[in-house]
Amino acid sequence: MKPDSAPQALLDVIDADAMLREVQEWAAINTGTANIAGLDTMAGILADAFSALPGEVELVEPATVTAISGEGREFEKPHGRHMVLRVRPEAERRFVLTGHMDTVFPGDHPFQEVSWLDDETINGPGTADMKGGLNVILHALKTFETIEGAQRVGYDVMINSDEETGSLASRGLIEELARGKYAALTYEPSALPDGTLAHARGGTGNYSITIHGRSAHAGRNPQDGRNAIVAASDLVLRIAALAGDDITVNPAKIEGGSANNVVPDLAVLRFNIRPKSTEAMNRFDGELDRALAAIKAEHEVGIHRHGGVTRPPKPVDAKAQRLFDLVKSCGAELGQKIGWQPTGGVCDGNNIAATGVPVVDTMGVRGGAIHSPDEFMIVPSLRERAALSARVLARLSTGDHL
């Protein structure tokens, strides 16, 4: 197919029936982030599917990730392998396309099956977020490879197993693959069912603060104790006061304590922040250190800090805006109206943008109600969005559009 072929011709070469069949099969495999067996099955299926493209497929072991238990102990969390496809790594101009195979539905969740809501809509776990998006990547690239000139450029595809829990086991891999790329596309579902894209994003960080006090009898000698729950409560008030117009702070959980007549010697405080700018992110980090030092001194407790910002804020600079404009232009060529809006949500696009690579991160299917049993995917959007991505890649592969 010639690169200047009528964009509508792209739709003719995309097998919509095969796309739907594959999404239904993939959604039937439970891939909750903690379901390592299900993720292993899915990784193998994806590796087979993407081996149809002219590159090398690799299943990459996850990076080590630790968490803090309710008893204040650090432990290693298991994760599934990530799939990476590398096509024409020697090409001067290269792209990266990313998605995730995990869902928020664990293996014992009652939401496990795909059903039809109407003639154009299916309900099923991960259909929109994002088994449908993974299928769009596959068929967009198959279509792109039929376009004259595609062989002049290269690309990497990264599908991770842990996006829904922050991509801690794949963050380094994402950043490694993104660096030096000309542009990036990520396949989260559209921000709205009409196909609206997510534009600028805030960041996010998750923290676990372990406080070690000293136990004592609550009636005989409470003065000899150091109450970890009281110290944690003081810390909650201090960090909540750090919220502002450019950052939210959500103290989510305090764990610890025992019998009512014992001064508690352990507490674990868990909280989330959502900075809207890098400045807010860095400011909070310094203020948190000062708050922890004050709590330690004033309550005479030990403190251990775990976690931090996992996804920095994603502003849209001039280069990224040109990529958004290109996607909109390609959509218009295909009869698709593309708009965008900012969002407080986060995804792997945040980490890609932090490497300086322009990214549009909601190139997946149209759908909605994600992370709930009402999740749905609009079936015609499979072919629509595959054609959109193929057209974007074709335009990016010729000339200097960014």
Image (tube, rainbow, N blue to C red):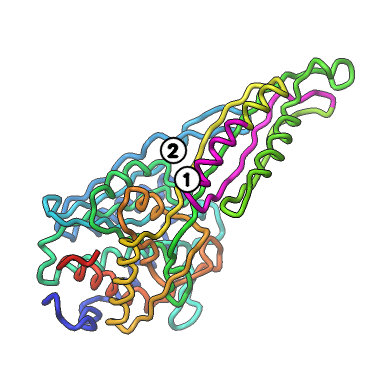
**Rendered view: 119 above or below 310:** below
Mark drawn on residue 78: 2
Amino acid under label 2? Answer: Pro
Dividing the picture into quadrants, the one containing residue 288 is: top right
**Rendered view: 135 above or below 167:** below
Left or right side of 139 for 276: right
Left or right side of 42 for 70: right
* Residue 198 picture location, percent across and down: 44, 65
Left or right side of 156 for 187: right
Mark drawn on residue 95: none
> How many numbered badges does the structure rendering display?
2
In magenta segment, residue 289: yes
Q: Tell me which residue sits at (56%, 64%) in the image.
A: 373
Q: Secondary structure at mark 1?
A: loop
Magenta stretch? Answer: 261-290
Q: Secondary structure at mark 2?
A: loop
Dividing the picture into quadrants, the one containing residue 12 is: bottom left
Give the labeled residue for mark 1.
34
Q: Tell me which residue sits at (32%, 78%) in the image.
A: 331
